[in-house]
């Protein structure tokens, strides 16, 4: 038998020489409450009843909290795609966990990413590029002020801003839904950069704005145009299937002076899976 424990109830000292086991009706859990002896016959029943009520209240609160937590967990498990989107603030991460030997991370567009295109777009071929440490993805949606063709935004407070535009070739030419075109079919470099300038820079190009143009065929056979545009913009573009892919980088004079080399690495690393 358990030793007597002194308690205070209703201002009277009592002793509790043994314990009483019972099941709480709210949860079905088993509890043990002290059965106390007092100076008045009815006080024993009062103390035991108060212990039952206290344990019952605790059980109800505990059960409610566990039920809510369980419901939330089951909701996330039942909808994995929504859970991922919620945890990443509307983004599906695509950045490598480790840098390469030069300290650059590789971003690869993940399958299922929607960007700012919304519903109705077919799956976009994956593209990739390198970024140094310190670049972060910025959420985009169909409400993005840059337009529904913005697929991705990245930003570094130290180095500048980047966006990837995925636009239909129909902006330049009539093609079928599943047509396969390359950048040369879309047009020469000057035509392409002039056609996208208002979207990329917020204004049409003036004479002399394009400081440098490069045409390159990459290891995967894809044709790419690259530009340097005033004041401190770098652009890379290619086309595959029925879309034009454009990566654009913008920086301030201070950012450009300090990080131009890194920004050029990002521009030169842009690749799109050719189909």
Image (cartoon, rainbow, N blue to C red):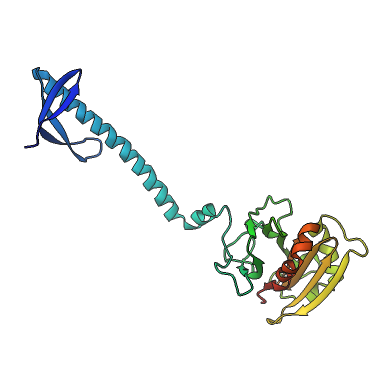
Whether residue 45 is situated above or below residue 208 in the rendered picture: above
At x 23%, y 29%, the residue is 53
Residue 71: x and y in percent read: 39, 46
Residue 245 placement (x, y as % from top left): 72, 68
Foreground pick, 28 / 78 = 28
Name which quarter of the figure residue 6 lies in. top left
Is residue 190 found left or right of 93 in the rendered image?
A: right
Which residue appears farthest toward the right when viewing the image? Answer: 207
Q: Nearer the viewer, residue 68 or 213?
A: 213
In this rendered view, identify the residue nearer to me: 7 or 18: 7
Residue 252 in view (yes/no): no
In the rendered structure, the answer to whether residue 6 lies left or right of residue 63 reads left
Quadrant where the C terminus sits is: bottom right
In the picture as drawn, the residue positioned furthest to the left comes out as: 1
Residue 60, image quadrant: top left
In which quadrant of the rendered view does residue 269 lie? bottom right
- Please give left or right for residue 229 compared with residue 46 in the image: right
Please report the residue visible at 12 percent of the width from the left and 34 percent of the height from the top: 20
Residue 3 visible at all: yes
- Residue 114 location (% of width, % of height): 61, 59
x%, y% of residue 32?
Answer: 16, 37
Quadrant in which the N terminus is drawn: top left
Q: Nearer the viewer, residue 80 or 34?
A: 34
Residue lying at 20% horizontally and 29% vertically, measured from the top left = 51
Count of residue discs: 0
44, above or below 170, in the image: above
């Amino acid at each position: 038998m358990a030793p007597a424990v002194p308690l205070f109830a209703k201002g009277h000292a009592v002793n509790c020489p043994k314990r009483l086991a019972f099941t709480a009706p709210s949860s079905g859990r088993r509890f043990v409450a002290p059965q106390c002896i007092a100076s008045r016959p009815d006080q024993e029943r009062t103390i035991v009843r108060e212990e039952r009520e206290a344990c019952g209240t605790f059980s109800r609160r505990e059960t409610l909290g566990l039920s809510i937590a369980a419901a939330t967990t089951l909701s996330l498990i039942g909808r994995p795609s929504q859970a991922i989107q919620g945890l990443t603030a509307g983004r599906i991460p695509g950045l490598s966990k480790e840098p390469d030997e030069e300290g650059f991370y590789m971003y690869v567009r993940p399958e299922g990413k929607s960007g700012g295109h919304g519903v109705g777009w077919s799956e976009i071929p994956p593209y990739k590029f390198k970024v140094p440490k310190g670049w972060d993805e910025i959420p985009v949606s169909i409400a993005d002020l840059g337009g529904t063709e913005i697929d991705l935004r990245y930003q570094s407070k130290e180095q500048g801003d980047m966006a990837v535009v995925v636009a239909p070739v129909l902006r330049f030419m009539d093609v079928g839904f599943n047509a396969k075109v390359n950048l040369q079919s879309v047009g020469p470099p000057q035509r392409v950069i002039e056609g996208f300038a208002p979207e990329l820079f917020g204004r049409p190009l003036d004479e002399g704005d394009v400081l440098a143009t490069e045409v390159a065929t990459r290891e995967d056979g894809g044709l790419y145009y690259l530009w340097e545009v005033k004041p401190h913009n770098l652009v890379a573009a290619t086309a595959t299937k029925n879309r034009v892919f454009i990566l654009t980088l913008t920086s301030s004079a201070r950012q450009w002076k300090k990080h131009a080399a890194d920004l050029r690495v990002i521009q030169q690393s842009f690749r799109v899976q050719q189909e």
